[in-house]
Image (cartoon, rainbow, N blue to C red):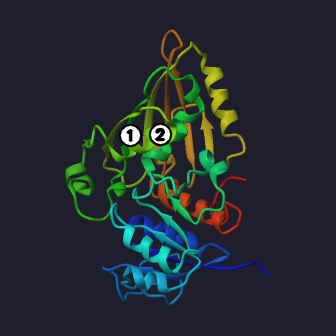
Amino acid sequence: MSTSFTVGIVGARGHTGAELIRLIAAHPQLSLAFVSSRELDGQRVADHSDAYAGELRYENLDPAAVAAKGVDAVILALPNGKAQPYVEALDASAPQTVIVDLSADYRFDPGWYYGLPELTRDRYAGQKRISNPGCYATAMQLAITPLLAELAGPPQCFGVSGYSGAGTTPSDKNNVELLRDNLMPYALTDHMHEREVSAQLGVPVEFMPHVAPHFRGITMTVNLWLSRAMKREEIEQRYRERYAGEPLIEIVDEAPWVSRIAGRHGVQIGGFTMAPGGKRVVVVATLDNLLKGAATQAMQNLNRALGLDELTAIPHPA
C-alpha cells in the first residue's frame, strides 16, 4: 500500500490556489487537509473548484492554527511579505512539516532550497523549507542557462505576462478594460525577478516586464551577447543536450506561441535567431505562469520533498 500525505494550502483564493487544489485533487498520494482563505471562510471548496469533490470548507486560519493542523506539508500561496509569521509558527511547533513558499520572501535565503528542479535538482538534500521560483524568473533562467558559459554581457529579457500574473487584488495590471488593445510596461528596472535571476545565475540580468490582455501565459524574449561566434545549429544542440530527459521542457524550432502553452504544465524554448556575425542570439521561452510558473513547480518540489516521483499527478508527455 502506498504512503499518503496530508497537505494544507494557505492563501487559496487566488488563481494559483485553484491550480494547486486541482493538482492535489488528482494526486494519488496526497489529501487536502485544509485550505485557508480569509475571503472564502466557511464556503465549500467544491463550490469553487470543479476538480475537488469532497466536503472540505475554507477556513480563516492564523499562523498558530496552521501549525497546529499537524499536516505533512503546507503550501504558502500568499502575497510577498506575508509568509514569515506562518514560517515562524511552523518552525516553532512543526519543524518536520515541509513548507513550499510561492512568494519571493525566502528566495534569497541560503537556508532555503530554491526549487527550480530542472536547474537546481542536484542542490536538493532533503530540505524541508523550499522556495518556489518566480514565474518570470523560471522562464528567464531556463532560457539563459544553456549559454551561461558563453555570455559576453548581461542578458536582456523582454517579458510579457497574462494578467493573471497580477493576482486577484484589483489593480491596473489586471484591469481588463485598461489592458484591452494595450501592452502595459511596469517595474522596468530592479524588478524582484531581475534580482532573483541575477542572484541565481551569478550574472547581472536586465529584465523589462509587461502585462498583456490575455489571461495566462508568459512570453520571454531573451537577447544574449556571446563571447565567441556560434552557429544556430550549435546553439540549438546546446539547449537540446542541456534539457534532454526533462519531460516538462520542449525545444522547438520556431519561436513558441503563448496561446499554445496556456493550460500546459511545461515550457517551450525556441526561435533561436542569430544576428550577423554569430555573436548575438535571441531565444524565446513560453510557460503558463500559473502552472510551471507556480503550481506545477510547487508540485514538483513537494513530490521530491515527500520522496515521491517528481512528476506524480503532473500531466506531461511520455
User: Quick one: label 1 or label 2, which is nearer the N terminus?
Assistant: 2
Look at the picture and state if 209 lies above or below 304: above
x, y percent for residue 197: 45, 41
Horizontal arrangement in the rendering, residue 216 relative to residue 28 (left or right): left
Quarter of image, res 150: top right
Please rate how many residues cluster around mark 2, counting C-alpha atoms within 10 Å: few if below 14, some from 14 to 19, many from 20. Answer: many
Residue type pointed to by label 2: Met
* Residue to which mark 1 is pinned: 159
Residue at x 45% of width, y 80% of height: 35
Q: Could you say which is closer to the camera, residue 121 or residue 138?
A: 121
Instruction: Look at discs 1 and 2 and give the one toward the viewer.
Output: 2
Residue 203 visible? The answer is: yes
Q: Quadrant of the N terminus?
A: bottom right
Q: Which residue is mark 2?
A: 140
User: What kind of element bears circle 2?
Assistant: helix
Q: Position of residue 209 (x, y in %)?
A: 33, 41
| Residue 258: x %, y % from top left | 46, 44
Q: Residue furthest right?
A: 1
Instruction: Work out which residue is located at the far front of the displayed protein and give it.
Output: 92
**Residue 257 visible within the image:** no
Total numbered badges shown on the rendered structure: 2
- Vertical comparison of 23 with 39: above or below: above
Q: Residues within 10 Å of mark 1 (few under 14, many from 20)?
A: many
User: Which amino acid is tagged 1?
Assistant: Gly
Q: Is 202 on the left or on the right of 6, as rendered?
A: left
Residue at (37%, 42%) from the top-left corner? 160
In the foreground, 107 or 48: 107
The answer to which image quadrant residue 104 occupies is bottom left
Q: How far across and how far down the image is residue 34, in percent?
A: 48, 83
